[in-house]
Amino acid sequence: MDYIAYNRQSWGVELTLCRPEALNALNLEVLHQLDRALDQIEQEKNLRVAILTGAGEKAFAAGADIAAMRDMTPPQAMEFSAYGQAVMGRLRHIPAIVIAAVNGYALGGGCELALACDIRVASRTAVLGIPEVTLGVIPGFGGTQRLTRIVGESRALELLATGRRVEAEEALRLGLVNCVVPGEILLDTCRDMAGRIARNSGWAVALGKRSICQGAEMELNQGLALEAALFSAAFSGPDQKEGMDAFLQKRRPKFHA
Ligand code: DAK
């Protein structure tokens, strides 16, 4: 069964979670196939951007698969959590920018998956939330950590403890998503954004992502040192001379990477 559709586009790669009959709920096999898709993404040459979305009209992903989790023992739950965290953690470490096109429910593990992406664009009908406490558990794919870093401790605690669902406009106010667009233009909006990213220097985009993502986990002084090192690395890359020459010569740059 193919749970992940992998489509190479002119601007990058589009990944679609394909389990619409269960609202794209994440079981071990879906996570495994996402992991393999990320292996493939790592093999792509000069990839600058990827879009991740869910198949069907209703859901990005309605969570970790509740039926599959029902009979897990504590050690199995630990293993499931560690694997899910590892797969989602890869999204932050790949050089390409990952855009989540949140096309409906993004609950529990589905919300955690969206939070692990670099940018979230939501349709007006998107619904986000971490309802795990209503099921007697807590988020296990990094949600308590990433949500807190994105919306702050008090809001994360409120969302966790109530388990309530957040509609797109509120998600925007909370900073949970970057923007909200009508569902009919969600993918085109993400593809336009992907196209803009793809026109820039892939080398520079990757350095910038690394500086922001790794720097966010450091003290300010360490983060600034990292930024200086990566800024300097840009000058040994293939695109710095071309980008600056193009500006000075009033033409469009032709980037290599
Ligand atoms: N898991 C499994 N199946 C799901 C599912 C899920 N999360 N969400 C939906 N489905 C299935 C439904 O069972 C139904 O299947 P059939 O009955 O047709 O066979 C089908 O998808 C359609 O769903 P509904 O009939 O319920 O559709 P509605 O439009 O009526 O409702 C809904 C949509 C999204 C409001 C509803 O499906 C819903 O409430 N779903 C559950 C949402 C939720 O609670 N998500 C959080 C899951 S808990 C951990 C690791 C990870 C996690 C925790 C710990 N460690 C290992 C420590 C993460 C936990 C979660 O994500």
Image: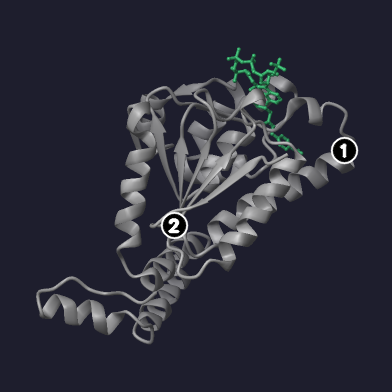
All told, the count of numbered labels is: 2
> Which element is circle 1 on?
helix
- Residue 172, x across and y down, in percent: 36, 32
With respect to residue 106, does 201 lie above or below? below
Q: Secondary structure at mark 2?
A: loop
What residue sits 63% from the left and 31% below the top? 24
At x 70%, y 45%, the residue is 31
In the rendered structure, which amino acid carries the disc numbered 2? Gly
Which of the labelled discs sits on residue 74, or is there none? 1
Taking depth in this image into account, of 69 and 195 the one nearest to the observer is 195
Identify whether 227 is placed above or below 2: below
Amino acid type at mark 1: Pro
Residue drawn at 68 percent across, 24 percent down: 133
Marks 1/2: CA–CA distance: 39 Å
Crowd around label 2: few <14 · some 14–19 · many ≥20 (10 Å): many
Quadrant of the displayed image that contains ligand 1: top right
Q: Which of marks 2 and 1 precedes in the sequence? A: 2
Give the x, y percent position of residue 37: 62, 54
Q: Is residue 115 above or below residue 223?
A: above
> Which image quadrant: the N terminus?
top right
Q: Nearer the viewer, residue 214 or 37?
A: 37
Q: Which residue is mark 2?
A: 12
The answer to whether residue 84 is visible is: no
